[in-house]
Amino acid sequence: MAVTRELLIGGREVPAASGRTTEDLDPYTGEVYATVAAAGPEDVTRAVDAAHAAFPAWAALAPFARRAVFLKAADLLDARTEEAAALMAGETGSTRPWAHFNVGLAANILREAAAAVTAPRGEVLSAQEEGALGLAVREPLGVVAAFAPWNAPLILGVRAVAAPLAAGNTVVAKPSERAPIAAGLFVADVLREAGLPDGVLNVLTNALEDSPEIAETLIADPRVRAVDFTGSTDTGRLIGAHAARHLKPAVLELGGKNSVIVLDDADMDYAVDAATFGVFMNAGQICMSGDRLLVHDSLAEEFTRRFAARAAALPAGDPGHPDTVIGPLVSEAAARRVAALVADAVAAGATVLTGGTEPRGAVHPPTVLSGVTREMELYYAEVFGPVCVVDTFADDETAVSLANDTENGLTCGIITENATHGLAVARRVHSGIVHINNQSVADEPHAPFGGVKASGYGRFGGRWGIESFSNTRWVTIAGRQARYPF
């Protein structure tokens, strides 16, 4: 029986003002998993009304009281792991390992938010006037508009709201239409159960066709003071433009075209293991996935043979089966888009090393290609599916040039047994994140997470997340009465 959910506004679950609903489909079966309210512009205003009204009390709440909410929410989330796994499977086709990873990291993001609430913030400044004291203090912004994607719904749904809330803001969250419950309403359920006051977090679900209007209405509201968005580069450009038009700061974590570089001093067994994980975890539907494997000429033949064999052996299909590694993409349309990228490359001369067959519904086979050139769409396009390209290089200069040959700059993995060599290469790669002797997929709640170039700007995580969602204010205290010239 399908789940039914309403909007969350002011601590109450309410239908859309229009009474409209929209369907949330299971990508593997194609059946309706849930029916959710389809918000309109009037619902956006209601949600901002509630967040704006709740802001003064939440911002003034004692830090240890706020901290307690996040700590309790983390424990509650851990306790609801199986419920979350079933939810993610139903909404996004997630396998159990990916769902369990989401729960664990999301819970730790909440714990990091708790730590941030009581961490020291601000500075004591030198003052020009004798006897005066200068302070730089951090203060919350007000209402934050938070947009969360579907691909890691618990991790990114929690991340979208945790730092803004920890900084003392209130939030209106708009989760992806592909995961309105996991990336939004479920996150709110956990925080509300943990004691988050009414109106501090509000959640708007909507029909896909209404997304542009909902986003523009939300960002344009003068009471919304900042925007955070995680998603595709194309959509991020629109969100960033809306925020800039209204002079509002934004944190944008966007798409990636990430490389895993296998240097000539890499351990072969480890390199194959690492690359397999970095490319195929969550069927490649991670912003950090390794779309490109750049392998030194001296290792290329053996690495390519072994990696393609590993990819061919990965079980694909039903996300509910415990052995499945490659589950469905988020929709049949997503699988067809990935297949079209592969077909275009093959028609233009690329070689299929494994896979490359037509998807079965939303399940695309693990696919490895070589001979992909700049004229092919796949060379620059973010795949967001279980497909990668193997390319080779003769020296570090060529490896760096290939890794940087993209408009994106999110993350990079460099496989090497020589950390000094790895660091020398890493310093020349243009990305917000780089992992030496590891693949490209990694996230830790206390680390600065974000990209450069078309992968966005601003940082989530740790103190950087708090700084992204608070203002620095200069405050002075005069030690004596000033003397004025007139």
Image (cartoon, grey):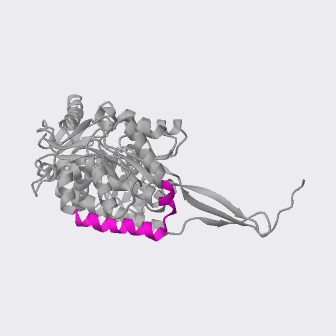
- The vertical placement of 124 against 457, above or below, is below
Q: Nearer the viewer, residue 307 or 57?
A: 57
Residue 251 visible, this orientation: no
Q: Is residue 229 left or right of residue 138?
A: left
Predominant SS along the magenta part: helix
How many discs appear?
A: 0
At which x and y percent is residue 462?
A: 44, 62
The quadrant holding residue 65 is: bottom left
Q: Nearer the viewer, residue 246 or 244?
A: 246
Q: Residue furthest top?
A: 347
User: Does the magenta portion include 211?
Assistant: no
Q: Is residue 400 left or right of residue 125?
A: left
Q: Which residues are magenta?
A: 55-80
User: Does the magenta portion include 68?
Assistant: yes
Q: Is residue 307 left or right of residue 468?
A: left
The quadrant holding residue 365 is: top left
Residue 85 visible, this orientation: yes
At which x and y percent is residue 89?
A: 17, 51
- The vertical placement of 234 against 73, above or below, is above
Q: Nearer the viewer, residue 294 or 343?
A: 343
Q: Nearer the viewer, residue 462 or 402?
A: 462
- The vertical placement of 164 against 406, above or below, is below
Going 49% across and 47% down the picture, which residue do you hit? 226
Going 22% across and 54% down the picture, which residue do you hit? 276
